[in-house]
Amino acid sequence: TMILKEVLAAIPISAEVLFGAIFSVLGTRLIFIFGNKKTAILGSSLFTAGLFIRFLLPNIWILTLGNAIMGTGWGILLLIVNTVIASGTEDEKNKGFAGYSAAALNGVNCGIVFGGFLINWLSYSLIFLFATVLSILVFIHVVSHLNKANYSLESIKGEKGEKQMSFWKFITSKGVLGYFMMIVVPVISCGYFLNYMFPILGYEYGLSETNIGYSYLINGLCVICLSNTLTKKLSKLINKANSLVLSSLIYAAAFVCVAYFENIYALLAILILLGISDSFGLPMQTSYYTDLDAVKQYGYERAMGIYSLFENIAQTGGSYIFSCVLLAGVKTGLYIVVAIIVTLALLFGFLNLIRNRKTASAV
């Protein structure tokens, strides 16, 4: 049945992000043992190997295996990138996370657009082969140009070389778990609307595969054009916490638009709205997180591993969430998602306001 195919489509995606989540944490140990350059080379090699496996035997289970290996590779690479950016100054973090988010999102969008073009001329197997060749070129770049980065004792063991904080103490520290559950998990999960549900609805509303691919450029342009400007302006104008709330509410507004109108124009609107939200919301997430006292005490390298873990778990759940939306019906399912997003975002903002008032009164 159609529903069965939609649920099956979530399996390869979930395998990729699940293994990305696991190795974004285990990657910390690899960095300690092998250093950043060798670990980055390992991550790039695994990513390329996963693509090549998908080319060899393109069926649903081999696709899942290839995605799992790819996820292992980019989970390691993601940890390295996030840790390097988090170790910078406040201004470097804002610029770094904004630039990284814009580059990553637009890389994905360009891949979708280019893939939509290639599908008119090549088979799926040849497209996987083409992607493998591109990945090999990136691998060569990593081997040739990646410089070794030596982290300070503070970035690995926490502030002042003190005894390492336990995972349980870190995750239950003020503001950490609430941030993950009220901001990171719902927003990252809902971001998978573009990866999973947008193509399904686009095809249902009459868009061809090629036009669906091209339409992602709208989202990418919003991110790349607005990222640095909105991140810098909003962090000063309404602070980072309120910016995260705003980002979540824009997501909710986008889903309301699709649920209410259910047409191509609503899909184009969601590309713009999610592009605006992600342009400042995603870099603000990591910047806010690295400002937390618990993160500084726990150590950036381990803390960013935990961040990547929650991020990838959310991505794993995203495809299944929108499978459930399709099962419940687009309108009903999206309204339920909107209610959850709005509730959690407003709760996060309220709790942050209370913490700020307590801090101010204690000074």
Image: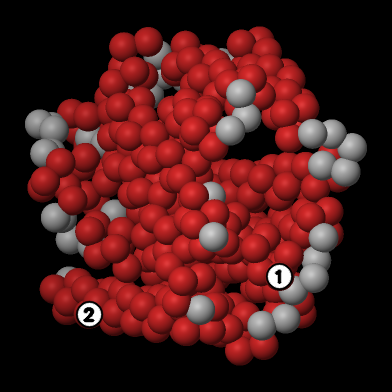
Residue found at the very far right of the displayed protein: 121
| Mark 1 residue type | Glu
Q: Please report the residue visible at 80 percent of the width from the left and 66 percent of the height from the top.
A: 207
Residue found at the very far front of the displayed protein: 1
Total marks in image: 2
Foreground pick, 116 / 162: 116
Q: Measured from the top left, where is residue 302 in percent x and y? A: 28, 35
Q: Which mark is residue 301?
A: none
Q: Measured from the top left, where is residue 342 in percent x and y? A: 40, 81
Would residue 103 appear left or right of 162 to someone viewing this image? right
Q: Please report the residue visible at 44 percent of the width from the left and 16 percent of the height from the top.
A: 39
Would residue 266 appear left or right of 302 to someone viewing this image? right
Which corner quadrant holds the C terminus?
A: bottom left
Which residue has dot 1 on it?
A: 204
Would residue 207 appear left or right of 156 to someone viewing this image? right
Above or below residue 107? Residue 193 is: below
Q: Which mark is residue 354?
A: 2
Q: Please report the residue visible at 79 percent of the width from the left and 55 percent of the height from the top.
A: 209
**Quadrant of residue 151 within the rendered picture:** top left
| Front position among marks 1 and 2 | 1
Q: Earlier in the sequence, mark 1 or mark 2?
A: 1
Foreground pick, 203 / 112: 203
Q: Please report the residue visible at 22 percent of the width from the left and 29 percent of the height from the top.
A: 157
Which corner quadrant holds the N terminus?
A: bottom right
| Mark 2 residue type | Ile
